[in-house]
Image (spheres, rainbow, N blue to C red):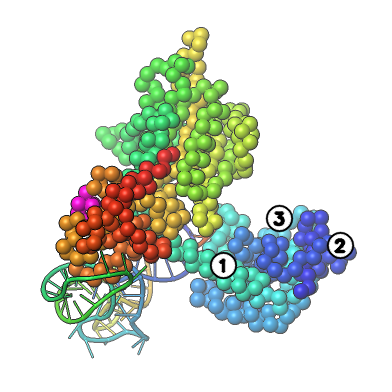
RNA sequence: GCCGACAUAGCUCAGUUGGCUAGAGCAGCUGAUUUGUAAUCAGCAGGCCCGGGGUUCGAAUCCUCGUGUCGGCACCA
């Protein structure tokens, strides 16, 4: 196999450039390594542009980079292009690839380039952003593109690719700009890798929580109810209740007190907090007797009111208030997505009021809490520190101090993190918890936010040792983030096969014949006594059919009972994975279920 | 919000260039069968074809305005 590029000073250099500059280095072969795919995908993006230009001659091109999964190209044409045209473009790409054009590279001055692309206002826009006075052009057949590379030596090497979707995207990623057409594609070095990737996508589709939520009757959405307002069905209600009660105990153990604020509060309060000015466009407002009220988008103000109810001594701190807080946020229609993005959701929210000396230990305690929960669900996760956003309250100095406090807490405890510049909440910097699910996708759930601003704005105080009035620090934190999103993620993570301690139904009971129904009911009652839900499959169907139906509900355990079981006070257990059966005495069975339900404690 | 696509029975989907009473499978109901580990058989019922306007002799099908959903963008738990 010939090299497609080389690695020089840790940079990928294509052969065209290497030859030009006389560079040498380790060879990059055409395989599925990250370096190789980088080059391959970049060239595939160019091949796609070449095909698009050939099919739609007035096409103008913006940028065509590689992304995590593949590549895309943003362009504009007067032709209307839809999903159905992707096949045509693919065909055109293949026919160009067959011609095996060399990919040639040459340098010109930026002024020459501007002249060359004078009819392509998008390329001109690209050049506006380029520093320096020379640019490189890559040429394959008739097609030329302004690009810094790296590229393959020949387009004939491109064979295993697929155009995935077509979408609109703002020029330069700014919603003030015009919308371009974007086509996403994937490319690999061989057929197997392409197939594996397509299989992975198919697997993700199978796990889609919207599909499973419908099949398993966990939740639903209805047009007449309104977009983004989920309806929890009984099965989803049971699952959620289990999660809530586990988490309730976990909070109590860590010294949190349950509280509850009202669903809406007078707008004056939102003005004091800064939500009115900084978050108002996401809030719902209503008038009652001439007074304006805002439906809460966050729970902090309610908890501040709890804090204000009493005078506090430094001896009382930290004070930890928690609430399964229902919040409403006016998310943009295009952002809504199953349970992942909704307009009404419940956060597992808490606010810790503490002294500035306690910040570090409190942050670490929360991080530890997060770790306990995430490892229980077998999630890997990473943490990101987000700094001051464009729209924010409070002085730069306070932001600097609080951001540094978060970093210190992490550094001192050797906790790794990444930085997300400008990603903080308007009242303070935060640590976001990004979890990776079973098939490698990342989701943002929990968040830990450090806030000096709201205590200041509400003039919160506690009495210090010398009876001086001191302002407490507030830590906002949520661990699951929201029940909606977290349950959506759990559903996809487990592909609907929830572990016993959280499953909507723990046991499916299948009586062999009508005469065994009574024992089934007895068993079901005993299960309720130990905190397990069961469903009896006693419909007038064949035994085979009922077992099949039970399997399809993804219940963790199926027990079959007939004459033999009743006679011996046993149950026949069927494993959902292996389809094998074994018998247990009723007593052993109940204690097994009880153990499995109680084995988890956060 | 922006670009593009889509909306037919509880669910998954057919429905030709506008033309007969809009179909199927599963689920549901009724009956027969009483079953030992992934679909027993027969029958019945089920639809304002997302909503409002329009074009047409005639609209599930064409146009238009909403609503919702999907894929992205932008924005965020």
At x 45%, y 52%, the residue is A489
Q: Counting residues from the N terminus, which is met first, the one under dot 2 or under dot 1?
A: 2
Extreme residue toward the top, this view? A466
Quadrant of residue A546 within the rendered picture: bottom left
Image quadrant for the C terminus of chain A? top left
At x 44%, y 19%, the residue is A316
Q: Distance between the residues labelled 2 and 1?
A: 34 Å
Which is nearer the eye, B36 or B21? Answer: B36
Q: In this view, does A336 lie above or below A6?
A: above
Q: Quick check: A543 left or right of A408?
A: left
State if disc 2 and disc 3 touch (CB < 8 Å): no
Query: Can marks 1 and 3 be said to lie on one chain?
Result: yes
At x 46%, y 48%, the residue is A377
Secondary structure mostly seen in the magenta stretch? helix
Q: Give the range drawn in magenta.
A: A520-525
Residue A407 image position (x, y, % from top left): 62, 34
- The residue that disc 2 covers is A23
Q: Quick check: A575 left or right of A1?
A: left
Count of marks, rendered view: 3
Camera-nearest label, 1 or 3: 1
Q: Counting residues from the N terminus, which is met first, the one under dot 1 or under dot 3?
A: 3
User: Could you say whether the residue bearing mark 2 is in a helix, strand or loop?
Assistant: loop
Query: Can marks 2 and 1 be said to lie on one chain?
Result: yes
Quadrant of residue A248 within the rendered picture: top left
- The residue that disc 3 covers is A129
User: Could you say whether the residue bearing mark 3 is in a helix, strand or loop?
Assistant: loop
Q: In this view, does A510 lie above or below B77?
A: below
- The residue that disc 1 covers is A197
Camera-nearest label, 2 or 1: 1
Q: Counting residues from the N terminus, which is met first, the one under dot 3 or under dot 2?
A: 2
Observer able to see residue A342: no
At x 54%, y 28%, the residue is A361
């Amino acid at each position: 196999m010939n090299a497609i590029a080389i690695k020089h000073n840790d940079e990928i250099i294509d052969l065209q450039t290497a030859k030009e500059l006389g560079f040498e280095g380790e060879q990059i072969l055409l395989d599925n390594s990250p370096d190789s795919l980088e080059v391959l995908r970049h060239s595939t993006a160019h091949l796609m542009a070449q095909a698009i230009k050939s099919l739609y001659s007035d096409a103008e091109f913006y940028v065509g980079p590689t992304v995590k999964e593949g590549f895309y190209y943003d362009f504009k044409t007067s032709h209307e292009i839809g999903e159905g045209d992707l096949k045509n473009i693919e065909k055109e790409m293949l026919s160009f690839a067959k011609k095996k054009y060399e990919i040639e590279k040459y340098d010109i001055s930026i002024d020459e380039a501007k002249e060359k692309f004078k009819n392509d206002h998008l390329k001109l826009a690209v050049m506006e952003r380029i520093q320096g006075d020379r640019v490189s052009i890559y040429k394959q057949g008739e097609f030329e593109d302004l690009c810094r590379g790296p590229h393959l030596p020949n387009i004939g090497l491109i064979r295993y690719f697929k155009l995935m979707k077509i979408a609109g995207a703002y020029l330069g990623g700014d919603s003030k700009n015009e919308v371009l057409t974007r086509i996403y594609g994937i490319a690999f070095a061989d057929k197997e890798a392409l197939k594996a990737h397509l299989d992975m996508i198919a697997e993700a589709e199978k796990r889609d929580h919207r599909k499973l939520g419908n099949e398993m009757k966990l939740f639903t959405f209805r047009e007449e109810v309104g977009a983004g307002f989920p309806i929890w069905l009984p099965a989803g209600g049971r699952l959620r209740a289990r999660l809530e009660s586990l988490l309730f105990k976990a909070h109590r153990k860590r010294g949190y007190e349950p509280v509850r604020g009202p669903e809406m509060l007078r707008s004056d309060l939102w003005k004091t907090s800064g939500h009115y000015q900084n978050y108002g466009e996401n809030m719902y407002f209503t008038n009652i007797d001439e007074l304006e009220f805002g439906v809460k988008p966050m729970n902090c103000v309610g908890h501040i009111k709890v804090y204000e109810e009493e005078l506090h001594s430094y001896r009382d701190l930290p004070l930890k208030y928690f609430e399964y807080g229902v919040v409403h946020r006016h998310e943009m229609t295009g952002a809504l997505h199953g349970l992942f993005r909704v307009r009404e959701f419940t956060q597992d929210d808490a606010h810790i009021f503490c002294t500035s000396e306690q910040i570090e230990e409190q942050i670490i305690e929360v991080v530890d809490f997060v770790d306990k929960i995430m490892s229980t669900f077998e999630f890997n996760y990473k943490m990101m520190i987000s700094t001051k956003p464009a729209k924010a309250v409070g002085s730069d100095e306070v932001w600097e101090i609080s951001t540094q406090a978060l970093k210190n807490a992490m550094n001192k405890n050797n906790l790794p993190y990444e930085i997300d510049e400008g990603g903080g909440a308007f009242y303070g910097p935060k640590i976001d918890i990004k979890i990776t699910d079973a098939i490698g996708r990342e989701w943002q759930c929990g968040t830990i936010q450090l806030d000096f601003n709201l205590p200041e704005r509400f003039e919160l105080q506690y009495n210090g040792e010398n009876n001086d009035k001191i302002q407490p620090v507030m830590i906002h934190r949520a661990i699951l983030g929201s029940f909606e999103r977290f349950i959506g993620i759990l559903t996809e993570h487990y592909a609907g096969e929830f572990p016993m301690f959280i499953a909507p139904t723990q046991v499916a009971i299948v009586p062999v014949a009508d005469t065994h129904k009574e024992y089934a009911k007895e068993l079901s009652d005993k299960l309720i006594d130990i905190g397990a839900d069961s469903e009896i499959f006693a419909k007038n169907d064949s035994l085979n059919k009922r077992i099949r139906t039970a399997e399809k509900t993804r219940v963790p355990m199926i027990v079959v009972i007939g004459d033999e079981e009743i006679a011996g006070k046993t149950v026949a257990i069927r494993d959902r994975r292996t389809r094998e059966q074994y018998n247990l005495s009723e007593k052993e069975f109940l204690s097994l279920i009880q153990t499995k339900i109680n084995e988890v404690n956060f």
